[in-house]
Amino acid sequence: MRLRPLHAPRVALAALAALLLAACATMGGPGEVAVGDMQTGRASWYGPGFHGRLAANGEVFNQDALTAAHRTLPFGTLVEVTRRDTGHRVVVRINDRGPFVRGRILDLSRGAARRLDAIGPGVVPVRLRVMAIPGAGGVPGAYTVQLGHFRDPDRARQLLDRLGPVIPGLRLVPGGAEGGVRVCTRAYGNYDHAVRVASRIRRDLQPDAFVVREDRILTQ
């Protein structure tokens, strides 16, 4: 992962600091998810190397089951996934966190990827539609902004040392089942605020920043 030099104007850094400090003072309610919500983007798949290991929700991952990883949707959410270029469809249950690659919105199990004929392409364009949510309405949770994921802990520390002075609460967290170390902000109770923080960080400091729901994969 390439580190971006810190050349942001002082006024931009001041604005970012104000946004981060404001987030510390106003811990609003969590972002809500509703049945029918839709999202478009690109989906990848995983399986080999993770089969039989624990998913982020604590269950044993079965690469042939119809499941998927999403950064923020509550565990147990049922999502209809439509491949936009072919019309193939599959319904998956969210049981893991990811994908931790910018530009992708879903990581399918191998079984789900087969239903979409996505094994060969590897990454395909998709549309997601929320079909069912565990409990009523949104599920409370916290969100964090991930700035980077490194196999080498020293590189994670370098990013932390470089941006820590201008991002209050920046921290190192375990990489979960994927290993390595992640560099993340403090947790935010309000999803929309986390999105604004991520947008400002991408613009002024680190182009790879994105919002991730803070669950076991980031706190184990």
Image (cartoon, rainbow, N blue to C red):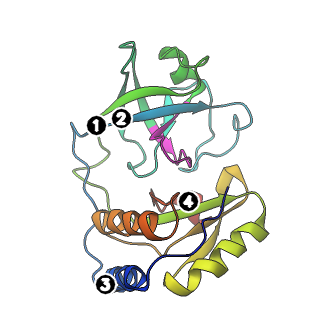
Q: Answer whether labels 1 and 2 touch (C-beta < 8 Å).
A: yes
Mark 1 surroundings: few (<14), some (14-19) or many (≥20) residues within 10 A: some
In the rendered structure, find residue 184 and report the number of the disc placed on it. Answer: none
Q: Secondary structure at mark 4?
A: helix
Neighbour tally class for label 2: few under 14, some 14-19, many 20 plus, Cα within 10 Å = many
Observer-side mark, 4 or 3, equals: 3
Residue 132, numbered label: 1
User: Range of the magenta residues?
Assistant: 94-108
Cβ atoms under marks 4 and 2 closer than 8 Å: no
Give the distance between the C-alpha atoms of the residues marked 1 and 4, in whole angstroms: 22 Å
Q: In 3D space, how far apart are the residues under numbered discs 3 and 2 (Cα atoms)?
A: 34 Å
Residue 10's place in the image compared with 119, above or below, is below
Quarter-of-image position of residue 199: bottom left
Percent across and percent down for residue 151 are: 75, 57
Where's residue 159, x and y in %?
Answer: 65, 72
Q: Report the Cα–Cα distance between label 4 and label 3.
A: 26 Å
Question: Which comes before the other along the chain, label 3 or label 2?
Answer: 3
